[in-house]
């Protein structure tokens, strides 16, 4: 990787996040699909991961020494596909075929897409699979790390807590779970549907090393993710506090954009706010 100054890193990842948001919104609008709010909330996390943290090679998606990344909240596929295309895993033109029959970019994450490790969509599956991958890496004495993004609403799934027990039992300090904590899920606010608090203390009690961060602060995210594992012999958990629909003012913190698709006028407003040049 080319040597860049701290400010250049910051600017590069911020610009990548902006482009992720632009393409994700276009994809969702064009296909009349949904989950744009979930894609926008994690755009900054993805940008920092793929710009500064993950050891991956877009020209060799199956490179054996690569870090593994799984998006467990697979309904936010548009955000991940946009990230992978912008980083060179596949042609940008593929994004125009999002959710079209016969093309690999399905509305939930598909492993037929270069750079995707696991098809996801049914919630609560990503972390258990990552535990198996992390254990395999340990036993093979491999240096790769396993990263997974969960949604906070997804943490209602019991399978995640079984996986949390397993990861601590096997001292999987090559495993990093990042919770995109945007405080909303499909049926309402987290505290109204099934409250998680005290969230960090629960993971601590499961013997995970826990850190909290502003999920839109690139400098803080990068600094945190570059000192993993937080504690030797403990899996790492990052609670990234985010805003659903971040970047577009009429989408921010609005439950409607979990399922809603922008109409042409809303698309134009969103692109203007994100600085899309025509």
Image (cartoon, helix red, strand yellow):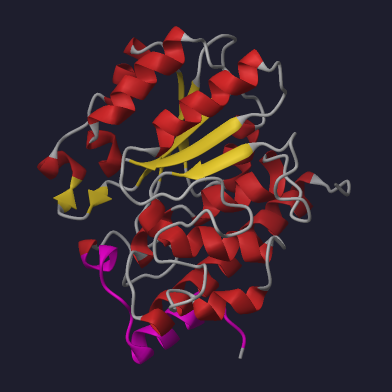
Above or below, comparing residue 113 to residue 131 in the picture:
below
Left or right of 233? Residue 142 is: right
Left or right of 11? Residue 26 is: left
- The image position of residue 139, as x and y in percent, is 63, 14
Q: From the viewer's side, name the closer residue of 40 and 29.
A: 29
Q: From the viewer's side, name the closer residue of 14 and 138.
A: 138
The structure residue drawn at horizontal position 63% and vertical position 29%, both measured from the top left corner, is: 145
Q: Quadrant of the C terminus?
A: bottom right
Q: Is residue 96 visible?
A: yes
- Magenta span: 256-277
The structure residue drawn at horizontal position 61% and vertical position 33%, both measured from the top left corner, is: 225
- The image position of residue 190, as x and y in percent, is 20, 43
The structure residue drawn at horizontal position 49% and vertical position 80%, both measured from the top left corner, is: 271
Above or below, comparing residue 15 to residue 126 in the picture:
below
Q: Magenta span has 1? A: no
Q: Is residue 17 visible?
A: no
Query: Quarter-wise, where is residue 93 in the image?
Result: bottom right
The structure residue drawn at horizontal position 73% and vertical position 39%, both measured from the top left corner, is: 55
- The image position of residue 71, as x and y in percent, is 47, 46
């Amino acid at each position: 990787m080319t040597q860049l100054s701290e400010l250049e890193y910051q600017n590069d990842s911020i610009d990548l996040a902006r482009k992720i948001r632009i393409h994700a919104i276009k994809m969702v609008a064009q296909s009349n699909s949904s989950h744009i709010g979930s894609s926008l909330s994690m755009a900054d996390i993805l940008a920092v991961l793929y710009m500064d943290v993950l050891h991956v090679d877009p020209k060799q998606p199956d490179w054996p020494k690569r870090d593994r990344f799984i998006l467990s909240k697979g309904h936010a596929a548009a955000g991940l596909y946009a990230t992978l295309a912008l980083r060179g895993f596949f042609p940008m033109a593929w994004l125009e075929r999002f959710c079209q029959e016969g093309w690999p970019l399905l509305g939930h994450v598909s492993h037929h897409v270069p750079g995707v490790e696991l098809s996801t969509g049914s919630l609560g599956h990503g972390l258990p699979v990552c535990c198996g991958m992390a254990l395999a890496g340990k036993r093979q004495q491999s240096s790769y790390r396993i990263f997974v993004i969960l949604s906070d609403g997804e943490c209602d799934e019991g399978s995640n807590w079984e996986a949390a027990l397993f990861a601590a039992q096997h001292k999987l300090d090559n495993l990093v779970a990042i919770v995109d904590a945007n405080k909303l899920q499909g049926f309402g606010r987290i505290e109204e549907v099934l409250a998680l608090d005290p969230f960090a203390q629960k993971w601590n009690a499961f013997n995970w090393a826990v850190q909290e961060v502003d999920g839109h602060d690139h400098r803080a995210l990068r600094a945190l993710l570059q000192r993993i594992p937080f504690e030797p012999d403990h899996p790492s958990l990052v609670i990234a506090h985010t805003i659903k629909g971040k970047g577009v003012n009429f989408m921010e913190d609005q439950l409607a954009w979990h399922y809603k698709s922008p109409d042409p006028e809303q698309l134009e407003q969103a692109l203007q706010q994100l600085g899309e040049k025509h």
